[in-house]
Structures are given as C-alpha cells and as structure tokens.
C-alpha cells in the first residue's frame, strides 16, 4: 500500500445515494480514500455491481475493503454452522476481489466451553480451508480475522498474529478500540500503541506494517469487555497518541472508522494524522 488511507465502515452518513458506488463518490468528495463494504447481514452484491464498484473506486482512487457477515463461528459444535461460516467468509472474499478490494475482515469465533488451544486449532483449520479454496479460484486478497473486544470472543492480538504467521494470505485486522476494551482500559498510551505495532513487525515483518487493516473508534467497556462503540471525543480512547504511533511507525494500509459518526471521526483522525 502506498500510504495510510482513512475511510468509513460502510456508506458515509452524508451520502445521498445509499449504494456502494454512491458511498465511494461521497468518500472521495469528503477527502477520504477508503471505504469498507458492510456485508454484516449477508453477502448481497451481484458480480455486475461488484465490477461497477471496481471501476468507480479505481477511477477515484478509493481503496475497498469488506466486513464479512456477523453470523460466523468457526468453533461451532454444529457442522452446518461451521460450513455456513466458511461459505460466508469465502463469498465475502470472492465478491470483494471482484470489486477490486484490498482486504476482508471477519469475527472468527467464540470460545464457548472449549479450551483456547483447541479453539485456535479449529479456527486455523477452517481458515486454511478458506484460503485453499480462494487459491484454487485464483483469488488473491488479504483474509483477516479481527482482534475482538469481548472476553468471550476468539481474537487476542497474539492469536490473530499467530494465525497470520502460520497461514498464507492471512494478516491481522487490528481493532484498537477492541484491544482497549478487552484489556479493560489498557492499550491506551503511546508506548502501548507502539508495542502493538512492534509485536506485529517482530512476528510478521515490515510487510505487515506496510499492509495494515485497522478499525478505530471510541468504545464503552466493562469487566467482560466491549459494550458499544462511541464517538472518539465521547470516549476515553487516547486517539491522538494512537495516531502518533501510527505516524512514527510509518504504517500503511487502511484505517476504518467504526465510530457512530463514521466520516466525522475518519476526517478527524486524518486531520490529526496529517498534522503530526
């Protein structure tokens, strides 16, 4: 990736045309340069529309990513649910690739009553199947399990980085708000933000820092982790220190705002980042 690009999780609120193409045009007019397609309730984009997204996003230099459906649990005890989860991730990757996309992200699993070691092995096995199927189809796109905000969810930084070490085409989606919530208020100083980036570079090399996929927002949390996303300014998220760490480590890729105000916090973050 050429630089760190800022964008929104879905169509910006200011977009009058409530389509992916309309959203991309609004992103460009706002001065942002990335947008995440939100397939959270199902992958409902035709190949015709995907090619239209590709054409418009390329012409306006807007990087496309996508969020897979929420209904995914690669650790389910029910075979049918695991197979459906695999298909949802695969379908997200296929249509996003057709749309000229850079990266897809998904929530991998819940621990349930299974040991964390066993959950890791199940998740690894199932993501490996997805990557194998994508390679068979000639689809080359980053497949990214996300760091998660609730203690019940699979997705510590260590788990996600280890998967990225062990499976081709897999890289982390680092949600800085989730890491803050999961640690009940940790990961909120310049040194802690820097430690995340250092850990990634140590295990995955400079390539990972040059191809980041980030989610950011304010967040409310409790003893079990994440409760809900907040506007940056309405939270205790030390976002200026976070942005300073990103700048100092010269990371590249996409930084996607998941704040309730979407483009406002994307623009705020971009403005601060460029002023550093």
Image (cartoon, grey):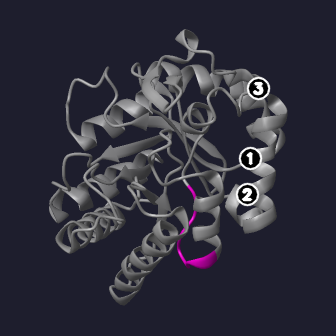
Res 196 label: 1
Q: Which residue is mark 3?
A: 241
For the residues labelled 2 and 1, the Cα–Cα distance comes to 6 Å
As drawn, is 228 to the left or to the right of 38? right
Q: How far apart, in angstroms, are the residues tagged by discs 1 and 3? A: 13 Å
- 36 vs 12: above or below: below
**Label 3 crowd (10 A; few <14 / some 14-19 / many >=20):** some
**Residue 164 image position (x, y, % from top left):** 60, 69
User: Where does the N terminus fall, quadrant-wise?
Assistant: bottom right
Circle 2 sits in a helix, a strand or a loop, which is it? helix
Question: Decide: marks 2, 1 in contact (CB < 8 A)?
Answer: yes
- Rounded to the nearest angstrom, the CA distance separating label 2 from label 3 is 18 Å
User: Secondary structure beneath disc 1?
Assistant: helix
Residue bounds of the magenta highlight: 166-172
Q: Position of residue 17 (x, y in %)?
A: 20, 30
Viewer-nearest of labels 1 and 3? 1
Q: Is residue 85 visible?
A: yes
Q: Which residue is mark 2?
A: 200
């Amino acid at each position: 990736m050429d630089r760190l690009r800022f964008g929104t999780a879905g169509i910006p609120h200011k977009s009058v045309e409530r389509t992916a193409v309309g959203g991309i045009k609004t992103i460009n007019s706002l001065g942002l340069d990335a947008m995440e397609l939100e397939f959270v309730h199902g992958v409902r984009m035709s190949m015709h529309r995907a090619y239209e997204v590709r054409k418009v996003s390329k012409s306006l230099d807007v990087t496309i990513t996508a969020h897979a459906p929420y209904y995914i649990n690669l650790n389910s005890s029910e075979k049918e649910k695991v197979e459906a989860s695999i298909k949802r991730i695969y379908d997200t990757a296929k249509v996003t690739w057709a749309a000229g996309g850079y990266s897809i992200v998904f929530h991998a699993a819940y621990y349930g009553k299974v040991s964390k070691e066993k959950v890791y092995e199940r998740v690894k096995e199932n993501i490996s199947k997805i990557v194998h199927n994508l390679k068979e189809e000639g689809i080359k796109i980053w497949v990214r399990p996300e760091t998660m905000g609730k203690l019940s969810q699979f997705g510590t930084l260590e788990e996600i980085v280890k998967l990225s070490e062990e499976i081709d085409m897999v890289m982390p989606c680092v949600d800085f708000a989730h890491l803050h919530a999961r640690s009940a208020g940790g990961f909120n100083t310049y040194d802690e933000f820097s430690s995340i980036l250092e850990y990634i570079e140590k295990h995955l090399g400079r390539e990972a820092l040059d191809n980041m996929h980030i989610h950011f927002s304010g967040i409310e949390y409790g003893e079990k982790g994440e409760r809900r996303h907040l506007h940056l300014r309405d939270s205790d998220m030390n976002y200026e220190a976070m942005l300073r760490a990103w700048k100092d480590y010269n990371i590249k890729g996409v930084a996607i705002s998941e704040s309730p105000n979407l483009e406002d916090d994307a623009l705020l973050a971009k403005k601060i980042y460029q002023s550093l």
